[in-house]
Image (cartoon, grey):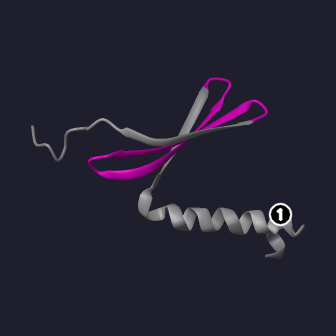
Amino acid sequence: MNDDYSRSPDRVLASEKVVAGRKIFFLDYKENNRGRVLKITEDVSGRRDTIMVPDEALDDFADALERILNIDAEGASPEDA
């Protein structure tokens, strides 16, 4: 088997858990032979949905979250931005 296509185990670099009511969010920053990724999993009563954010998109992702948080902090609605 070609090593480029074989799955290597993910190494967890950091993990966080956020509880919001009946939802639990797991944030796992992982690394494998293909690179680093932020895995965000939402668990609602045992049902899980996951997105993967590649390392090269994390700065843009964080910037977008910060813009959203700034809108909320200013008391404006997203439609006003």
Residue at the limit of the structure toward the top, as seen here: 46
Q: In this rendering, would 66 be left or right of 52?
A: right
Residue 11 in which image quadrant: top left
Please name the residue that numbered disc 1 is placed on: 72
Position of the C terminus by quadrant = bottom right
Q: In this rendering, would 69 be left or right of 5?
A: right
Q: Give the image location of residue 51, x and y in percent.
A: 52, 46
Q: Give the image location of residue 54, x and y in percent.
A: 43, 56
Tell me if residue 28 is in the magenta stretch. Answer: yes
Mark 1 Cα within 10 Å, few/some/many (few <14, many 20+)? few
Q: Residue at x 33, y 53 (%)?
A: 35
Residue at the limit of the structure toward the front, as seen here: 13
Q: In this rendering, would 6 be left or right of 25?
A: left
Q: Which residues are magenta?
A: 20-46
Q: Residue at x 54, y 68 (%)?
A: 60
Q: Amino acid at mark 1?
A: Asp
Tell me if residue 24 is in the magenta stretch. Answer: yes
Residue 7 in which image quadrant: top left
Q: Main secondary structure of the magenta part?
A: strand
